[in-house]
Structure formats: structure tokens, C-alpha cells
Amino acid sequence: MGVMHCLVLLLVAISACMASCSHQVHEAAWTLSNGNGSIQVGGTVPGGVYTDLLFANVLNKGDFYYRFNDFEYRWVAGDNWTYSTTFDVDPKLLEHERVALIFEGLDTAAEVLVNSKKVGESNNMFVRYVFDVKEHLQGTTVNLEVAFQSPTEYATQKYNEQAVDYIVPPKCVDPAFKGVCHANHIRKMQASFSWDWGPAFPNLGIWKDWHLVGWNTLNVKTIMFAASPTSPLPSVPNHDFKPGWELTVKVLCDSAIREGELEGNFDVSLADIFSMKYTVTALIENYETMLTFNVTLEENQVDMWWPNGYGSQPLYQLLAVWKNKDQSEESSASVRVGFRTVKLDQDFVDEKNHTKGRHYRVIVNNVPMFMKGSNWIPAHVLPEMVTEQYTRELLKAAADTHQNCIRVWGGGIYETDVFYEIADELGILIWQDFMFACSMYPVDGPFLETTSKEVKMQIQRLQHHPSILLWAGNNENEAALRGNWYGTASDFQRYKEDYIKLYVDTIKAVAEETDDSHPFVISSPNNGIESEEEGHVAENPYDTLYGDVHYYNYLSDAWLGHATPRTRFASEYGFQSWPVFKTMKAVTTEEDWNRDSAMMYHRQHHPGGQEELALQIGLHMHMPPQDGSQKAYEHYLYLSQIHQAVAIKTETEFYRRAMSELNEKGEGFTSGALYWQLNDIWQGASWASIEYGGRWKMLHYYAKKFFDPILVSMYVEDEKLFVYIVSDLVHPVDDLRLVIDLHRYDRKERVHNRNDTIIVSPLAASLVMELNMWEDLQMDKLCTEDLYDEEDVCFVTSHLYRSDGSLAAPDNFLLFGRPKDAFLPHAKVSLSDISGPWQTQHSNWTFSMTVKSSEVALFVWLESDYSGIFSDNGFLMTEDVEVEFYAYEEATLAEIEENISVSSLTDTYSKERVSGNLLDRAFHPNDIMNIVNL
């Protein structure tokens, strides 16, 4: 578990306190009231105003996210709210040298009053506050109030104060966001004011734990940890190799005295590996101190921690216990640590020709690793609604699809301790943004001061986790400044100076002073060292020869991906889709079940999103008729997921193929692909691969294949089929047989095939086949049909077999043409031989079934009313397929049989089509502009 204090008894069981280390655990009820007192309900701490009003039935319009509730409930954020409670304290508490109220998190602008006396104020959701209260405690009864100012009013007030000098843009979010203005002027979750994938619910409340504490010497609050191997690490993982380590353990404490020295002892232990006692003199400055201990571990004492897919994730409990000089007071903290090294390599790709740029690759334990993963957004707009179980479910879904890296995006929150603990366990590296996104920000004294505290505190809290990969200063703010997203070109030099003052002089300086054990990058996207050499704001922050790139293109053909940049590191890319009908039904009514309904446009926050999605779907598939039927609506949702899955499959495979090659411009050596985004914040149009609630979209099933350690990837160029094998394995694999099958849409058996014996090279992408479509695949003979082009008659699949006949990589496919133009008979898809349940490693309630089809079937989609996942989904069928369903909850065979369905692409086809429908015929270049102008 994360940080543990002798005083935090309400959270976890911990080491015993000595008598004079006093804590107060309060069961007293909280009350929540609004500004004029017209609303008074019970309060929950930790929690938030929206949640309390929901539980009290003040917010009573169904599910919190039901229909237009983000508008209906907006009045909440426009009011002031006060949490108050009364409790008794032990008179012995006042005998301590220092008595303080500690708030781990206040959201956001608040005054704290004890017995009607102001003891402190907050202005930052991400800062821990310690307020001295001893002089305000009289008698045994305490009246505690935390009075929150409306976050929207506070942000507007700060914006107006700043605007007297000059405007710090944007003035407001895009109208399509349907949000609230000036989030950049308040230090809280930026996305709570809305984003292009989520609603505006600017929360208020005591969102983390609080404690009333008395102590005389030191109160241990957290531990920082760093480890360096004492001998060189091998470049190929050897799990029997256990080097020695030089450890640096930093114990951070709150002191009972403002300045001076305190003597005592620290016991520092690591699991059952060592236990050492130190006599120390703590130097106190402004009520804080940090004690540093250096320890050397010999070889073979600990195992190394590895990212997902490269090895195991051993974790060791590190404990620090303080005892004052006369042994009358004790305080402790404990964290779990792992042993690994991490580096962000930015060496020149060609030492003789620097014009070809620099690497941007992650090296863990001396092994270069391709980062496969996604971006994380808040799992709910109200942080208190996210459970440990749901967090684990989402992160495990990432790990189960071979992801080894997740970027915690800079417009949300620094996630809970549990989030990082689970990432440690699963081997998921965390690219950690600081919470600044898509805006310019103020740089006045108070803002920089609270930012410095935020950065320092969050690094101190998170640094010990082996999952932390790097710190990043912001999301897209360098690109926004250089690209004039918010009109900054009119005074570019001023805004550039502000940018440097905030991210370089403040955040970078504090981060590197606080932690020298992790890389720091100023922005994402960013050219890394090149951006710094260009004065921190590059001429082109999207330069493909440096750093990381965010790339979105909704107008070109995403299933071909010809416009995709060959970048060093793709840290954002993606396409939208909608959740399935079951998910949308929970927060809508029948009148909303039309792709052009007011509700659908309300849930679409991306500017032009509905038109762009229609364009992309229509490029490849027939749009359902606008007949107002539920079935047409369900088909539209399904088609959106097909488009998204294939588009991101295409782009991810492109990035993985580029890991070992440079083109003549120096582009390539791609070392990471983090698609946007893993999870959803509500039920609406978004880029997520997992719907709000945890249901996997088709994309997430595809991610399990395109992130597999061995990938067979195919593409067509100049009438040739190119076949690559991409491997993340650290050892070569030989004696494999690669089979490329040519299929026609109108028959299930293959019509031609090519195969070869290959060796898979380690940590590389290798071209293993180059087939002429006419001479080698004979498509001019085998794929002819009146009125159809050859690419509309045939497609290919790949299969990679070991010598024992088992698959060494997931099967893959490549469609040469567009499905809507394909010579594709209607497929009747059905389920048979459903059996179970039985216990497997995936579920205690596993069911198996056979999927059958009368014809070739595209994008076969299984759904169940029960929560769970399938072993495969969204697949192509040329033969029967065996599938398992892993239920998350107890279910009988009869219940599963009754609540499972299967469909495929041709089930969306109508018997008649309106001729000339723009979205039902092949696109021409002019059509793109026609769609954009709709």
C-alpha cells in the first residue's frame, strides 16, 4: 500500500503509535449546505458536492449522466457550498507541540474555519494542505467548516483579474464542448469544465482524506526511493541475473517545530532483506525535513522489475520508522518499490549525419523497448465515483492487450495511489503528465507558487513507483503556442516568455531538483532536446525526426493510412466511435435513438465530429437508412466501432513496422505507439477503446492482436503486397511457417496461398515477403468478376505457425477494397455448442461456443447482457471459430444462452438502397469537401 501514517488509522491498519503520537478518528456526520442555506443535506468526506446531492435526491433526474443532466445540473457549480461538522477531541491532544488539520485534497477554492476562526485557505486541487489549529481549539468540542467558492465564479474572477493586464487564452472552450469557460485559471481537473470527449461537472468538495493530528517531533509523510545497479546490465534480459544496487532512500517528514534540529532514530528496512538503524539529527526548515539514507545491496538479494511482456514485477516493502530521542514518539511510512532502470534515449540516430535527427526511445533495464499502449483520462468526471475495482479492471484490460505503457494525460488528475500500485503490479509504465493542457496559463506570483508546491508534492508522492516512466510538463501547450491555436501570434514573444517561465523555469526546475531518477520532458508533443535547443518552443513541434507526435486526420482514408507520419514516437493518435446500444440505452430515451438526434449531437463534443464520422464510415461501409428505427441506430453504433477498430489497427501497424527502418529523410525508428484513448468518462462519442462502465469496444479486441509480441502486418503499395514480422521478443524465434491465404468474398475456402519458413528477429520489424498481386497472388485470374474490380472480390489473411502447428502470432487480415463495394453475399452467422461454466485463469464463469457462418463474414460481433469479455471479437470468418466468454459475475448456461447475440457486417445491409446516396457509393476527392461543408 502507498504512504501509511501512524495518524491515518481511518484508512489502513498501521504500526502502533506511542502514547504521545496523537491522532483523532472522527465518526461525526458532515453537513453540506449551499450559499444561501436553501439546501442542506448530509455530506460525505472524502467526496464531492455532486455526489452528495445525488445521494440526497436533490439531483433526481435518473442516472447522473442521463440525457442532458450536464446542463440540468450546471447550477451546482455556480453556487458556493460549505461542508461542516462538529466533533469532540481528547484534551490530551492540546498537550502536543503541534496540532494541525491535514487535508490530502481540497477541490478547490476554499476557506477552512475552526470554531469560526479562519485557519487556512486552498486554491489548488492537487496540493496537500497542513493548517495549524492548536490555538483555535478551545474545550473539547470542535466546529469545523470548509467553505468552497463556486469554481466557475472563482475561475471567472481570476480570468478578469488577469485580463486587466492581458488575456491568458483561451477565453473559452469551443462551443462544441458544451462546457464552462476559464478552466486554465483554476488549479483543478481541467476536463471537469468539459472536453471534446466529456461533460462539464466542475465539482467541489473534500475529495481526499483529512486528519486532525498532534505530535511533538516528526510525522513521517512519505518515502522517495531510487536505485542504481552496481554493475552493467546485459542488453538481453537475463532473469537469473540479479545485480547489486546502490539505494537512496529519502524520508520526508512534517515537523512539530518551524526551524531547528531534532534528534532521534530511523529504522529503515526492505522486506526481509535488510533492516538498519540510524541515529539522526534532522534539520528543520519551515516545518519540514528530509532525511537521506544510502544502502548498498549485494548481488542476488533482489529480483529486477520488468514492464509487461518482458518479465515479472517483484515488489518489496520499504519501511521507515521514526522514534524520537527518548523513544516516546513514533511515526512511520511504508511504500512498495521495484528495482529497474529507465532512460529516455535521445542520441543522434546517425552520429555522422545529425540532420537525420534523434532517437526518442525508452530503455528499461538496458533493453530498448517499443512502448505499446494508450492514453488515460479520468474514469469519471467525479473522482470519488471511481472504485479500486473499476481502476483495476481498466488497467488489467490494458495489460491483457499487451500494453506496457499508459500516458496519464495532463487535463485530468494525478491519479490515486491505488492506480499506480496496480500499474506497479501489472508492469505498466506510466508516462505522467503534469496537469496543464491545451491552454496558456497565468504566471503571476501566486500561480507559480502553488504550481511549485503541486509539482513537488506530486513527485514526492509518486516517485517511488517503479511504474513511473517519465514526467511531462504539459499536454500540447507548446504546439498550441507555436500553432496559434488561441490567437497568441499577436503577442507571441510575451506568451513564449510566459511559457518558459512556467514550464522551464518553474515546473522543470522543481521537477529536476526534486527527482533526478526519471526523465523530464517539457511538453507532449515535443521535439525533446531539439525543442530545448530552439529556445523551448520549436518551429515545428511535430517534427518527425525528433520527440513525440500527436496525429489526427479525419479526412483522408484511415483504412489506408497513406498520410500517417513516420514519427519517432506516436504518443497520441485515434479515431472516434460510439458505445454499443446497451451502453447508450442506459442514459437515453427512444427519441434519442437516431444518429441525427439532438441527444447524439449533445453527446458529440468534437467539432464537426458527426460529419467526420459519417465521412469515415461512408468511405468503406453503407450507412444505415435514416428510417427512425432502433435497428438502424444500433447498426450505426456498430459501424462506428468497425471504422475505429480498423483505422487504429492500420495506424498502429504502420508505427510498429517503422521500428527498425529509416527512410531517406531520416524518418523512422519509431519506438512507441500510444493510441488515444483507453477509457471513457461517460456514454458518448469518444476515441476510447473501452466504454464507460468497462465494456470492450471492437478496438480493444483488435488491440489485443496489433499489440501482440509478434505481429504479422501487411500493406499494399505499387501493386505489391508487403508482409512484415514485428517482434518485441528479446530472442530470435526460428522454424516458423508463414502462410498468406488469398480469399474471395463469395466462397469460404481459400483460392490461393503462399508460404515460407522464416526466422523472427528479436526486437525488430522485418520485411519477410514481397508478393506481386498479379504474378504471385494471381489476382488477375482468381479475383475476376463482372462489374467488380479485383480488389473488391478478394482479400488476404495471414497465419504464423510454430512447428507443432500452434499459432505463433494472431491471425491478421487485409482488405484490398472497400467492404461496401465488395462482392459479398449475405452471411447468416449463428452460435452453437454453448457450454459451461467452468473455472479458468480468466474467469470463474467461462463459457465456450462455436461461431458458424453460411458465408464469409466480416467484423463478426458478439454481445452479452452480462458483464465480461470474449476471447475474440470483431473478427473475419472463413471457417468456424471457437470463442470463449469470460463472465465477470456468476451466470448459468441458460442465462448466457438467452443473453448472447452475434451479427456481422451484412446484417446492417438494407434490402433496398436510395440510389445516389452520397454515403452509399464510392468516394471521389470532391466528396470529402462536400461532407466537410454539410
Image (spheres, helix red, strand yellow):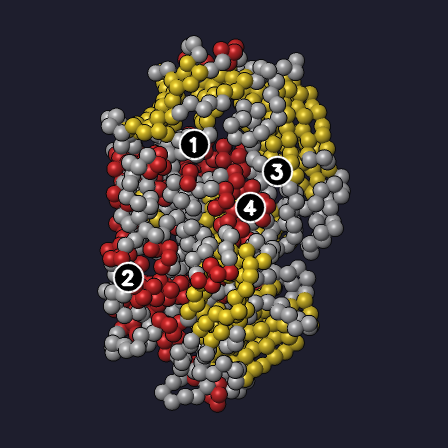
> Which amino acid lies under the numbered mark 1 shown in the image of this protein?
Pro
- Which residue is painted at 35% across and 34% down in the image? 52
Crowding near the residue tagged with mark 2, few <14, some 14–19, many ≥20 C-alpha atoms within 10 Å:
some
Q: CA distance from mark 4 to mark 2?
A: 37 Å
- Residue 902: image quadrant is bottom left
Tell me where residue 250 appears, x and y as whole percent. 61, 30
What residue is at 30 percent from the left and 77 percent from the top? Answer: 911
Give SS at disc 3: strand
Find residue 46 and name its label: 1
- Amino acid carrying mark 4 in the image: Ala
Quadrant where the N terminus sits is top right
Looking at the image, is mark 3 or mark 2 earlier in the sequence? 3
| Residue 423 numbered tag | 4
Q: Quadrant of the C terminus?
A: bottom left
The amino acid type found where label 3 is placed reads Arg
Q: Quadrant of residue 725?
A: bottom right
Q: Which residue is mark 3?
A: 336
